[in-house]
């Protein structure tokens, strides 16, 4: 990996590790965003309006997280993001089962995807802190808080 020069006092090897991690999460967040949009576009049932609106809000939060992760990678001197095809190869979470539209089933699938990425990012907080990058750990904490809040909203909708 080639990093550009920066005045950030952090070893290049640490910056490389962090940029790699951040770009992995950009790919995963992008994948979850797309799955949430699939839910938004295709959900049907008695809870359609509430879920349709909720999924748009969740998608917006994921795009904010995606942007923050990519910009942190660029801040550390790395390349931010990657082409969509490469992102698809790097995303390693559950895939969206096309054809599922019933609102109660969709809300469970959305909760599964949000929890997957939220738990990954929560692990990254400790990892980046251990690498000595408090700035990235702080950013990840902020993203984690939003994802946890969003997951709470989704889980509340899913309760019978």
Image: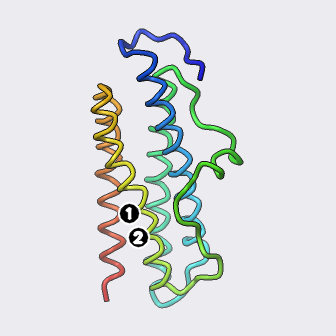
Q: Position of residue 141 (x, y in %)?
A: 29, 43
Q: Foreground: 64 or 19?
A: 19
Q: Residues within 10 Å of mark 1 (few under 14, many from 20)?
A: some
Residue at image position (42%, 56%) is 117
**Figure check: 106 above or below 133:** below
Q: Position of residue 87 (x, y in %)?
A: 63, 47
In the rendered image, the quadrant that contains the N terminus is top right
Label ID, residue 111: 2
Q: In terms of secondary structure, where does tag 2 sit?
A: helix
Whether residues under marks 2 and 1 lie with C-beta atoms below 8 angstroms apart, the answer is yes
Residue at image position (51%, 20%) is 77
Q: Position of residue 3 (x, y in %)?
A: 55, 18
Q: Position of residue 12 (x, y in %)?
A: 45, 16
**Figure check: 108 above or below 136:** below
Locate residue 80: give its quadrant. top right
Q: Foreground: 144 or 18?
A: 18
Residue that label 1 marks: 115
Q: CA distance from mark 2 to mark 1?
A: 6 Å
Label ID, residue 11: none
Locate residue 100: give its quadrant. bottom right
Q: In terms of secondary structure, where does tag 1 sit?
A: helix
In the rendered image, the quadrant that contains the C terminus is bottom left
Query: Left or right: where does residue 126 sit relative to residue 73?
Result: left
């Amino acid at each position: 990996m080639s990093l550009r020069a920066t005045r950030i006092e952090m070893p290049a090897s640490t910056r490389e590790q962090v940029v790699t991690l951040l770009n992995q999460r950009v790919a995963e967040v992008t994948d979850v965003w797309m799955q949430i949009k699939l839910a938004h576009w295709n959900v049907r049932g008695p809870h359609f309006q509430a879920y349709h609106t909720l999924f748009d809000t969740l998608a917006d939060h994921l795009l904010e997280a995606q942007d923050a992760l990519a910009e942190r990678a660029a801040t550390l001197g790395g390349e931010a993001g990657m082409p969509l095809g490469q992102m698809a190869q790097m995303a390693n979470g559950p895939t969206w089962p096309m054809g599922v539209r019933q609102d109660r089933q969709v809300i469970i699938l959305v909760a599964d995807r949000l929890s997957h990425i939220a738990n990954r990012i929560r692990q990254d907080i400790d990892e980046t802190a251990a690498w000595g990058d408090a700035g990235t750990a702080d950013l990840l904490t902020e993203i984690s808080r939003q994802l946890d809040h969003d997951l709470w909203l989704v889980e509340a909708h899913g309760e019978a």
